[in-house]
Image (spheres, grey):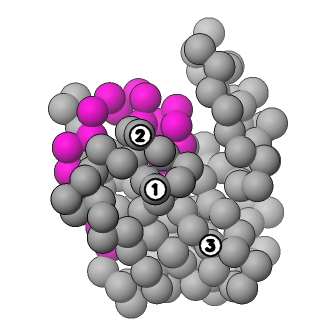
Amino acid sequence: MAIENPDDRLYSEEHEWAKDNEDGTITMGITDYAQEMLTDIVYVELPEIGKKVQQMEPVAVVESVKSVSDVFSPVSGEVVEVNDLLEDQPELINQDAFGEGWIARIQMDNPAELDNLMDAGTYTAMIEEEEH
């Protein structure tokens, strides 16, 4: 099954996405591919607002009926907002991974770290490689 990965985001090898909000912050979540692999998400442990995070270190935890997975921060910085809806509706990640299912907004320490992430085409090719 082909998964559409929006071109307006960047992607990590661990299946997180980052959308540059053009104001020094990114919005982040897990990709559609990741939520599909996890199946039904039953719980999301959101980071604390004000938490300092490092690029590719755990920022949140997603629990599904199959497993518990760390969610890694696509950039270093400070968590400035979290998606409180996920506390009562973790399934939003399954329903709309790139929209309503976002996890956190992070104030970037170093926007150049975005260069370490993949564009949609590169990420899509990586997934297709993994599936074969």
Total of numbered circles in the picture?
3
Reply above or below: 63 against 107: above
Name the residue tied to disc 3.
Answer: 26
Is residue 15 rendered magenta in the image? no
The disc labelled 3 sits on which kind of residue? Ile
Can residue 14 be seen from the camera position used here?
A: no
Dot 2 or dot 3, earlier in sequence: 3
Residue 20 % position (x, y): 71, 70
The disc labelled 1 sits on which kind of residue? Glu
Rendered image: mark on residue 95: 2
Which sits in the foreground, 3 or 51? 3
Query: Viewer-nearest of labels 3 and 1?
Result: 1
Rendered image: mark on residue 46: none
Q: Which residues are magenta?
A: 30-47
Label 3 – label 1 distance at C-alpha:
15 Å
Q: Secondary structure at mark 1?
A: loop
Residue 12 % position (x, y): 62, 49
Label 1 – label 2 distance at C-alpha:
8 Å
The disc labelled 2 sits on which kind of residue? Gln
Is residue 84 toward the left or the right of residue 101 in the image?
A: left
Name the residue tied to disc 1.
Answer: 100
Mark 1 touching mark 2, by CB under 8 A? yes
Q: Quadrant of the C terminus?
A: top right
Reply above or below: 18 against 30: below
Dot 3 or dot 1, earlier in sequence: 3
Q: Quadrant of the N terminus?
A: top right
Residue 108 % position (x, y): 63, 82
